Amino acid sequence: MNPVYLSYNFLAGCYAAGLIAGDENGNLNLEGTLTRAEGCTMLCRLVDRMLTYGRLGSDGKYYPFQLP
C-alpha cells in the first residue's frame, strides 16, 4: 500500500485484522472499483469478527473494538 492515501492507517489495520485480503498477490488495488462481491465479503468478515469477539451485547448495542 502507498502511504499517500489518507486512509492508509485504517486500511493497514483492516488488512492486519483480516477484514480485507487483497487480490491473489495481496495487493489492495486502491485505484480500482469495489465490486458487490468484495463489499459483501468485507461486511461478512466484519460482522463475523464482531460476533466472534462478543462486541454485540445482549442488549443489541454495538461496542467498538480496536483494530491491531
Image: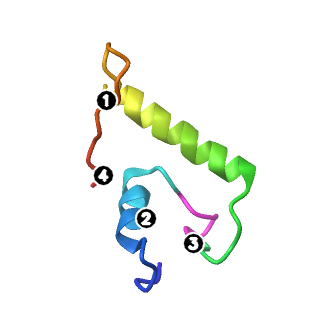
Q: Residues within 10 Å of mark 2 (few under 14, many from 20)?
A: some
User: Mark 4 or mark 1, which has the lower sequence index?
Assistant: 1
How far across and how far down the image is residue 35, in percent?
73, 56
Q: Can you tell which quarter of the image residue 26 is in?
A: bottom right
| Residue range highlighted in magenta | 21-28
Label 3, label 2: how many angstroms apart (C-alpha)? 12 Å
Tag 4: residue type?
Leu
Q: Any mark on residue 11, and which? A: 2
Helix, strand or loop at disc 2?
helix
Of residues 20 and 59, the one nearer the viewer is 59
Instruction: Tell me if 55 is positioned left or right of 2 in this view.
Output: left
Is 48 in front, or is 59? 59
x then y, percent, for residue 63 = 29, 33
Q: Nearer the viewer, residue 23 or 65?
A: 65
Q: Which residue is mark 4?
A: 67
Cβ–Cβ below 8 Å for labels 4 and 1?
no
Marks 3/1 in contact by CB < 8 Å: the verdict is no
In the image, is residue 24 part of the stretch drawn in magenta? yes
What is the x, y in percent for residue 28?
Answer: 57, 69
In the image, what residue occupies the spot 39% across and 66% down?
A: 12
Q: Label 1 belongs to which residue?
A: 55
Q: Earlier in the sequence, mark 2 or mark 4?
A: 2
Which circle's residue, 3 or 1, is located before the other in the chain?
Answer: 3
Residue 16 marker: none
**Nearer to the camera, 33 or 45:** 33
x 39%, y 33%: residue? 50
**Which amino acid, by three-letter code, is at mark 1?**
Arg
Distance between the alpha carbons at the discs numbered 3 and 1:
29 Å
Report helix, strand or loop for mark 3: loop
In the displayed structure, would residue 57 be above or below residue 10?
above
Mark in front: 3 vs 2: 2
Residue that carries the numbered disc 3 in the rendered image: 27
